Amino acid sequence: MTVGVYTFELHLSHTRSLKEKRQVVRSLKERLRSRHNVAVSEFDHSELWQRAGIAVVSVADRRETLDRLFEAVYREAELATPGQVVETGRDFIEGSDGGPGGWDAP
């Protein structure tokens, strides 16, 4: 089992207030959750009205599955966001198949 964390940053040049930015971010988070069955959170730049850091987390059997999922999330974010999307990272934790509590460090 593999846990994947995908982070990206949004540059929302057309938003003019925190309220408008929060509407865009909330809509994107709901869309990603419903279409890709992932956990999504805003983790950075919460008080800036033209930037947002987003983290997406998922679990799968293999890393390749998560890579494909994160590519789809990136494309979805580009289509659904009125701004620029910049990938900032992908982290993976590979677990062993040894049963509960059998996690191995990457």
Image (cartoon, rainbow, N blue to C red):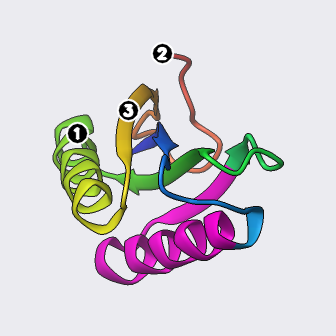
Where on the picture, by quarter, is residue 73? Answer: bottom left
* In the image, residue 17 above or below residue 88: below
Where on the picture, by quarter, is residue 21? Answer: bottom right
Q: Which residue is mark 2?
A: 106
For the residue marked with disc 3, what is the amino acid? Answer: Val
For the residue marked with disc 2, what is the amino acid? Answer: Pro
> Which residue is depicted at the point 60% across and 50% down?
100
63 or 69: which is nearer to us?
69
x, y percent for residue 9: 50, 38
Crowding at dot 2, Cα within 10 Å, few <14 / some 14-19 / many 20+, comes out as: few
11 lies left or right of 20: left
Q: How many marks?
A: 3
Q: Which residue is mark 3?
A: 86
72 lies left or right of 19: left
Q: Quadrant of the N terminus?
A: top left
Q: Main secondary structure of the magenta part?
A: helix
Which residue appears farthest toward the right when viewing the image?
Answer: 47
Q: Which residue is mark 1?
A: 67
For the residue marked with disc 1, what is the amino acid? Answer: Asp
Q: Which residues are magenta?
A: 20-42
x, y percent for residue 80: 30, 68
* In the image, residue 65 above or below residue 8: below
Crowding at dot 3, Cα within 10 Å, few <14 / some 14-19 / many 20+, comes out as: some
> Which residue is depicted at the point 83% across and 48% down?
47
Circle 2 — which element? loop
Which residue appears farthest toward the top when viewing the image?
Answer: 106
Sequence-wise, the earlier of marks 2 and 3 is: 3
Nearest-to-viewer mark from 1 and 2: 1
* In the image, residue 2 above or below residue 79: above
